Amino acid sequence: MKRPGEGQLLVIACGALAREIEWLRQTHHWDSITVKCLNANLHNTPAKIPEQLEALIKKYVDQYEKIFVAFGDCGTGGAIDRLTERWEIERLPGAHCYAFYAGESRFDALAAAEPGTFYLTDFLVQHFDRLVVRGLKLDRYPQLMADLFGHYRRVVYLAQRSDGRFLQDAQRAADYLGLEFESIPTGMGELGRQLETQVLRLIPHSDGPHAAY
């Protein structure tokens, strides 16, 4: 008996990329793709990401012909690469989602210009209170602010959408952290191209239309 999903592609993604990946899936008519996301809260404890990734890989490896990991290294010190090499599966190239959106060269320039930069994406702006304020317990222990953010100098908001509300919320996040603020519109950046290039090679009989970026 054929198992659910057999012959198709499973994308295991970071929850912070869920909206963009789902947009790509619908735009490309990638009906043979299933997307499952890990909780974006894991970025506060990156050492746990490989363990949870492997749990999903073990759970679904017999149900799909291919598995793709839509994560950067995400602060795991190469642990995700060691995991994907062991299972012989691919992942998105790059260190983290900031580089996906900004592009490697622009991100490198931003980091070189000011190493003490805290980056925001649409997802992080939308969930700043949950992931940063409460996630890092700044609401309960405000004295942690100096320890966690004392070496930062600015916030750079890499904006996927032109939305004035998001821009205002990003500014408020920078004000909360007591940092200078800069906004850079990136759209999907390199994420769409990277994901499209890799996924199209993995989808059986992929001949659907391509999105424009």
Image: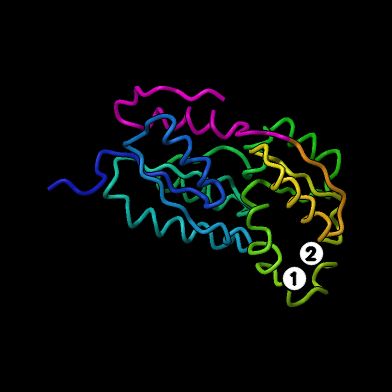
Disc 1 versus disc 2: distance between alpha carbons?
9 Å
Residue at image location 62% in from the left, 37% down from the top: 100
Q: Pointer 1: what residue?
A: 138
Is 4 displayed left or right of 167 in the figure?
left
Start-end of magenta stretch: 185-213
User: Mark 1: which amino acid?
Assistant: Leu
Mark 1 vs 2: CB contact within 8 A: yes
Which of the two residues, 87 or 137, is positioned nearer the viewer here? Answer: 137
- Where's residue 5, x and y in %? 26, 45
Q: Residues within 10 Å of mark 2 (few under 14, many from 20)?
A: few
Residue at image location 40% in from the left, 22% down from the top: 209
The answer to which quarter of the image holds residue 11 is top left
- Where's residue 106, x and y in %? 74, 32
Residue at image location 86% in from the left, 57% down from the top: 151
Which of the two residues, 212 or 150, is positioned nearer the viewer here? Answer: 212
Q: Pointer 2: what residue?
A: 148
Is 192 displayed left or right of 89 in the figure?
right
Task: Return the disc, 1 or 2, that comes first in the chain's sequence.
Answer: 1
The answer to which quarter of the image holds residue 175 is bottom right
- Where's residue 13, x and y in %? 48, 48
Looking at the rendered image, the disc whose residue lies closer to the viewer, 1 or 2, is: 1
Residue at image location 69% in from the left, 47% down from the top: 166
Which of the two residues, 60 or 196, is positioned nearer the viewer here? Answer: 196
- Where's residue 41, x and y in %? 58, 61
Secondary structure category for the residue under label 1:
loop
Screen quadrant of the C terminus = top right
Is 120 displayed left or right of 78 in the figure?
right
